Amino acid sequence: MSWHLHPMLAFDTETTGVDVETDRIVSAAAIAMADGRADTTEWLADPGIDIPAEATAVHGITTEHARAHGRHAKDVLVEVLAALSAAVESGVPLVGHNIVYDLTISDREARRHLGVDLWTALGGRPFVIDTMVLDRWTAPFRRRISETQGPYQMRTTAETYGLGWDEDAAHGAAYDALMSGRVAWHMGRIAHLPRGQRPPWVRVLRVSRHNHLAGLSLAELHERQVEWAAADAESYQAWLRNPAKAGDNYDATAVIDGTWPLRPVPEAVTAP
């Protein structure tokens, strides 16, 4: 069975910021997707620290709301990890958009509250499907939807694959998780279509690697993503170090970590 036809567990988090070493999970969602059904479980946590206004502007959750309605962060984490662990045990892949972020911050929370790393907490290593990694690899030079959107952010990817976007519902963990699962299925479907039956935007791409997704098992797709994420990071690092290409973004010492699907703990960092 091709990877995109398997049941999936879509996973996403909303957090206090973007630094996995110091920020905390505020909300999370896990959506079991199979046979056209989507069963959603959501959590709201009191992260134990203030939620900056910048983070609230993204997901809409204030410090006051999290304290009043959220549960203790450790209790939420235990339930989230139980849902992910059940997927690992049953061989169901975890899917998300830039899920390396969600898994890494979950790892830091597991270390903070439980004293163990994520893989230990889950009882094994899951199969992972990262729609950002797949999108970057299969369509590396496609056009932006608009100049105001990042080329591979969740909204852009969803709209590129013809799924539309509900801005009112967006930026919550459940909506983003659902969209990543839907995108993953569409990516797999397109990969298995004859080229002439693929959407017009795919057929006109200067570089299209959708064939690279065809006929793979979950294990094979996982291993390919390890390679593709590393290659993408290496390419981006080289671009940043090239003044002629990077322009104002030029950084002669730029280092981009392409480790996937979980970033290692930096040696100098001890989680608070």
Image (spheres, rainbow, N blue to C red):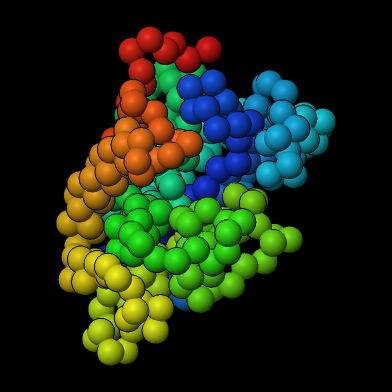
The N terminus - image quarter: bottom left
Of 157 and 218, the residue lying toward us:
157
Q: Is residue 247 left or right of residue 255?
A: right
**Residue at image x 53%, y 12%?**
272
Of 251 and 9, the residue lying toward us:
251
Give x and y (percent) for residue 68.
Answer: 81, 32
Determine the image quadrant of residue 257.
top left
Q: Residue furthest bottom?
A: 196
Residue 38 appears in the rendering: no
Q: Residue furthest front?
A: 244
Of 219 and 52, the residue lying toward us:
52
Q: Is residue 7 above or below residue 44?
A: below
Of 109 and 164, the residue lying toward us:
164
Q: Is residue 228 left or right of residue 51?
A: left
**Residue at image x 60%, y 50%?**
173
Determine the image quadrant of residue 209.
bottom left
Give x and y (percent) for residue 6.
Answer: 32, 67
Q: How many marks?
A: 0
Q: Is residue 100 left or right of residue 216?
A: right
Residue 153 appears in the rendering: yes
**Residue at image x 69%, y 61%?**
167
Give x and y (percent) for residue 271.
Answer: 47, 15
Q: Is residue 171 above or below residue 200?
A: above
**Residue at image x 54%, y 73%?**
163
